[in-house]
Image: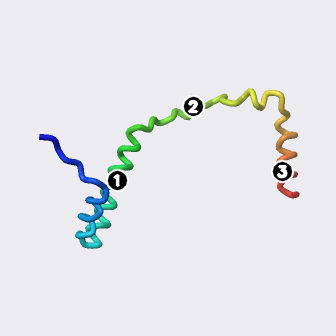
Amino acid sequence: MTERIATLDEAIVVSEKLSPSDRLRLIGILSDRLRDELDQGTESIDMLSLAGLGADVWQDLDVSQYLERERASWDS
């Protein structure tokens, strides 16, 4: 026997029969479960693996001059 999946509209109708406090609990439970699902697909990044990334952008740039220009632009 195949399990029937409720539609969103059906879930809303059922949820409207709950008390306001139970609806808030339901929202909390659903958001926690969704957050867990989303977190499962996310790999953490090792920050050390990013070391040196983009170094070529700064290779031919004088950092002191760059900072002076940037700071001067704040005053304009």
Whole-percent x, y for residue 26 in the image: 29, 61
Instruction: Indicate the position of residue 15 as horizontal and vertical percent values.
Output: 26, 65
The residue tagged 1 is 32
Q: Residue at x 29, y 72 (%)?
A: 20
Instruction: Give the tally of numbered discs.
Output: 3
Q: Position of residue 58 (x, y in %)?
A: 78, 31
Mark 2 — residue? 48
Q: In front of the other: label 1 or label 2?
A: 1
Q: Disc 2 or 3, which lies upstream in sequence?
A: 2
Neighbor class of circle 3 (other Cα within 10 Å; few <14, some 14-19, many 20+) is: few
Q: What amino acid is at disc 1?
A: Asp
Q: Which residue is mark 3?
A: 71
Q: CA distance from mark 2 to mark 3?
A: 29 Å
As measured in the structure, the alpha-carbon distance from the residue carrying label 1 to the one carrying label 2 is 30 Å
Q: Amino acid at mark 3?
A: Arg
Q: Secondary structure at mark 1?
A: helix
Quick one: SS at disc 3?
A: helix
Q: Residues within 10 Å of mark 1 (few under 14, many from 20)?
A: few
Quarter of the picture holding the N terminus: top left
Q: Which residue is more in the foreground, 58 or 24?
A: 24
19 displayed left or right of 64: left
